[in-house]
Structure formats: C-alpha cells, structure tokens
Image: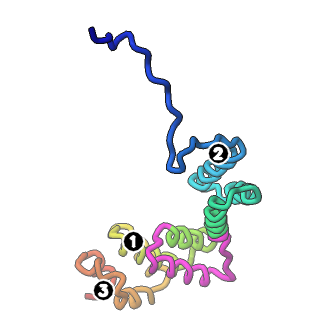
C-alpha cells in the first residue's frame, strides 16, 4: 500500500539563497543609515534643501562606500538648489537681464517670478511689463500678453516700436487686437 501524502511531515524550511550563496546578514547600523538616507531624500522632495543638506552631510561620515558617492551627489544637488534661491542683483535692470535669460532657456515660472519681483519693487518698470508680455506670448496666453504689453506701452511708448520688430511676438501677429495695439494710427 502507498503511504498517504496528507500525513507526511512538511519539508524543513530552507534559508533564503542569494547570489553569494549565503543569507544576508542583518546589520542595524546599515539599516539606520538607509533610513536616514531615505529621510534626507524625502526632505529634498519636499524642497527642504537646507535640512536635506545637513542630513546628508551628517550621514556621509559613517556611510558605506557604495552609498557615499550617491550622498555626495545629493549634497551637490542640495547646494545648487540652495544657491539658486540666493541670487542677488545690483539693479532691477540686472535682474531683468537674468529673467530674460531664464525665459530664453524655457524656465518660464522662474522668469515670471523675477519680472513680478521687479514690479513689486518698482511698479513703473515698463521693461518688466514688456518681459511679462513676451513670456505670455511665448506660453500662448494672448489675453495676458495684451494686458502687459498695453501697460508697457502706456508707461513707455517706445515699447510699441520695439514690439513691432520683436520676433517673440510672432504668435500674436494674427490677433487683430495686437495689430491695433502696435499700429493705432492705421
């Protein structure tokens, strides 16, 4: 008679196998470093670069070699983000030039922030209104473009002549309101 399989004993559990052939060793120090690393990454994702930088710096002293390179990379990323927010300008015109460079590189929200900062400090800065008009044109917001360009021209009529030759307004050329604004004498 054949033995009943339901009464047989279950095979003994085997230890997990790894590529090296041995079970991984649980290291509480390494587990703590990984937890700190993940917490610092979370701080970065939240935009808290100062705190993340401090956490990565503290971690770098005791981290294993394979993690140290990544930590250094994240420290550099934190420093770049921290310095990005601390740009200082000698004048509003210098800040305008910086905003234009951001605009030309496709950093529209950063450019908008700088144009508005100029206007907060100096509401009669016609060139900042002009920059906002260019930004609105480039991002396809014709209504906002016309509002800002109208104000730039009201404050400085020479902006009308400049806008006529500015290729950044090419997407606005078919809008009759734009044509009326630039060529009121026709």
Task: Determine crowd level at label 1: few under 14, some 14-19, many 20+ residues with C-alpha closer than 10 A.
Answer: many
What residue do we see at 61% from left, 74% from top? Answer: 122
- Distance CA(mark 2)–CA(mark 1): 44 Å
Quarter the C terminus occupies: bottom left
Read off the residue under disc 1: 136
* Rendered position, 39 above or below 73: above
- Distance CA(mark 1)–CA(mark 3): 20 Å
Q: Is residue 112 visible?
A: yes
Q: Quadrant of residue 70?
A: bottom right
Seen in the image, is 165 located left or right of residue 124?
left
State yes or no: discs 2 and 1 in contact (Cβ < 8 Å): no
Front one among 125 and 16: 16
Tag nearer the camera, 2 or 1: 2
Tag nearer the camera, 3 or 2: 2
Q: Is residue 85 visible?
A: no
Across and down, in percent, residue 77 comes to 61, 66
Task: Determine crowd level at label 2: few under 14, some 14-19, many 20+ residues with C-alpha closer than 10 A.
Answer: few
Question: In this picture, which residue range is highlighted in magenta?
Answer: 82-109
Front one among 177 and 6: 6
Secondary element under disc 2, as helix, strand or loop, is helix
Front one among 156 and 144: 144
Mark closest to the chain's N terminus, 3 or 2: 2
What residue do we see at 60% from left, 68% from top? Answer: 120
Task: Determine crowd level at label 3: few under 14, some 14-19, many 20+ residues with C-alpha closer than 10 A.
Answer: few
**Res 183 label:** 3
Front one among 87 and 126: 87
Circle count:
3
- Distance CA(mark 3)–CA(mark 2): 64 Å
Q: Is residue 54 magenta?
A: no
* Rendered position, 94 above or below 55: below
What residue do we see at 41% from left, 77% from top? Answer: 134
């Amino acid at each position: 008679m054949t033995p009943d399989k339901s009464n047989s004993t279950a095979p003994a559990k085997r230890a997990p196998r790894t590529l090296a052939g041995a079970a991984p060793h649980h290291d509480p120090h390494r587990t703590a470093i990984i937890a700190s690393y993940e917490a610092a990454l979370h701080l970065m994702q939240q935009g808290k670069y100062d705190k993340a930088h401090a956490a990565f710096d503290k971690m770098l002293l005791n981290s294993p070699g394979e993690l140290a390179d990544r930590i250094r990379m994240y420290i550099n990323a934190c420093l770049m983000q921290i310095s990005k927010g601390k740009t200082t300008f000698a004048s509003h015109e210098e800040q305008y030039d910086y905003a234009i460079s951001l605009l030309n590189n496709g950093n529209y929200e950063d450019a908008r922030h700088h144009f508005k900062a100029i206007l907060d400090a100096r509401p009669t800065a016609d060139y900042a209104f002009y920059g906002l008009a260019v930004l609105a044109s480039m991002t396809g917001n014709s209504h906002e473009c016309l509002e800002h360009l109208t104000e730039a021209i009201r404050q400085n009529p020479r902006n009308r002549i400049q806008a006529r030759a500015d290729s950044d307004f090419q997407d606005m050329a078919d809008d009759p309101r734009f044509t009326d604004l630039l060529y009121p004498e026709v």
